């Protein structure tokens, strides 16, 4: 994840280059290091170097790294002729390179030649079944064609090999949620919480799934994970605070007439959550405070 300091440094370099102060290569190096895809700027600055023979030759072996970086940026910007020229230059320099072959397959994908791209990716995977980028490109092709069931199949196969890929687990979870397959989504978020237990967004998404499923036990689980989200975020997550209030209101209605153990085990929590929300709204959105107050009263959780 890019830090605020790194992002500030990148923005500073961008302003410097745009104002004619130089630093295009430094910007491109930093963008590559941080793995950010500001494709329009990368394409613009990269071409300013590649089209200048003196600047290009001064890069040494980094010239080919720049060709690859610009090729990807050009495909993002749908400048396919530029991407093709960069890939051709790389192909002449590295005629047997599988890395260049991957770029050629990506170009087919960018053109919408799905079958040709899929065939190229399959061929590359036969030679190297552990190429993570190619596995992910196949998922992207399936999603681009609206073939979500195939995307799920390939993501699951990918995760059998690369079980520690948090982004893949999160993407699979989001697909399941979009299909209302909440139990499968919950499993994905459980994997994320096990591997990254201190990331509040995983706890929040897991709580959302159980709140959506509904029912007393699921609501109690949702409330538990909304609470852990608040703990992990230092009490600064308004969505989780609202979640506490909604769960508490629903639990109190469902638990009427039931045994004591079925009722809310932490009766003070909703009032604390509503007080925190009211405090935040007073500071950040005072004009909406009356709406919040009436909503909390309807839920019977006002502070």
Image (tube, rainbow, N blue to C red):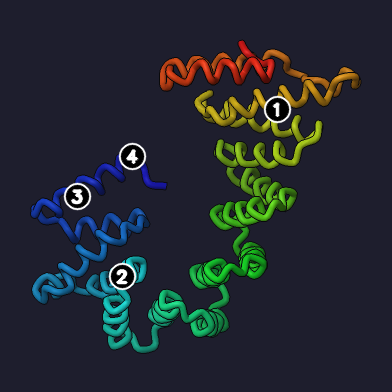
Element marked by disc 4: helix
Q: Is residue 74 left or right of residue 220?
A: left
What residue is rendered at 55% in x and 71% in y?
A: 145
- Earlier-in-chain disc, 3 versus 4: 4
Q: For the residues marked 3 and 2, what is the alpha-carbon distance in whole angstroms?
A: 21 Å
Q: For the residues marked 3 and 4, what is the alpha-carbon distance in whole angstroms?
A: 14 Å
Q: Position of residue 115 (x, y in %)?
A: 53, 83
Tag 4 residue: 4
Q: Is residue 156 left or right of residue 134?
A: right
Find residue 74 and name its label: 2
Find residue 247 and name its label: 1
Front residue of 196/111: it is 111
- Earlier-in-chain disc, 2 versus 4: 4
What residue is rendered at 51% in x and 72% in y?
A: 134
- Earlier-in-chain disc, 2 versus 1: 2
Element marked by disc 1: helix
In the rendered image of this protein, does residue 185 appear above or below residue 138? above
In the picture, residue 198 is in which quadrant?
A: top right
What residue is rendered at 74% in x and 33% in y?
A: 221
- Earlier-in-chain disc, 3 versus 2: 3
Task: Tell me, yes or no, if residue 127 can be seen here.
Answer: no
Q: Which is more foreground, mark 3 or mark 2?
A: 2
Q: Position of residue 256 (x, y in %)?
A: 86, 20
What residue is rendered at 33% in x and 39% in y?
A: 4
Q: Is residue 64 left or right of residue 229?
A: left
Q: Is residue 89 left or right of residue 108?
A: left
Element marked by disc 3: helix
Q: For the residues marked 2 and 4, what is the alpha-carbon distance in whole angstroms?
A: 27 Å
Task: Tell me, yes or no, if residue 181 can be seen here.
Answer: yes
Tag 3 residue: 13
């Amino acid at each position: 994840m890019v830090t605020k300091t790194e992002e500030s440094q990148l923005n500073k370099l961008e302003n410097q280059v745009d104002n004619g102060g130089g630093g295009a290569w430094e910007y491109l190096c930093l963008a590559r290091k941080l793995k950010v895809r500001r494709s329009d700027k990368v394409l613009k600055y990269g071409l300013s170097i590649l089209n200048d023979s003196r600047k290009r030759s001064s890069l040494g072996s980094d010239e080919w790294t720049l060709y690859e970086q610009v090729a990807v940026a050009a495909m993002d910007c749908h400048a396919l002729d530029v991407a093709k020229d960069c890939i051709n230059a790389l192909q002449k320099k590295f005629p047997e390179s599988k890395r260049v072959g991957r770029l050629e397959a990506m170009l087919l994908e960018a053109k919408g030649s799905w079958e040709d791209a899929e065939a190229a990716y399959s061929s590359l995977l036969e030679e190297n079944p552990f190429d993570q980028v190619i596995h992910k490109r196949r998922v992207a092709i399936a999603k681009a064609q609206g073939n979500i069931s195939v995307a799920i199949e390939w993501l699951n196969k990918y995760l059998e090999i690369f079980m520690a890929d948090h982004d893949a687990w999160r993407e699979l979870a989001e697909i399941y949620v979009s299909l209302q397959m909440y139990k499968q989504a919950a499993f994905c978020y459980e994997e994320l919480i096990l591997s990254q237990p201190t990331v509040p967004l995983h706890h929040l998404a897991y709580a959302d799934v159980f709140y959506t499923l509904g029912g007393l036990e699921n609501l109690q689980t949702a409330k538990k994970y909304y609470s852990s989200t608040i703990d992990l975020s230092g009490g600064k997550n308004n969505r989780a605070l609202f979640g506490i209030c909604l769960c508490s209101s629903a639990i109190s209605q469902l638990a009427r007439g039931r045994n004591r153990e079925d009722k809310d085990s932490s009766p003070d929590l909703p009032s604390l959550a509503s007080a925190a929300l009211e405090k935040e709204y007073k500071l950040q959105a005072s004009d909406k405070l009356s709406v919040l107050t009436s909503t909390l009263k309807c839920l019977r959780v006002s502070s």
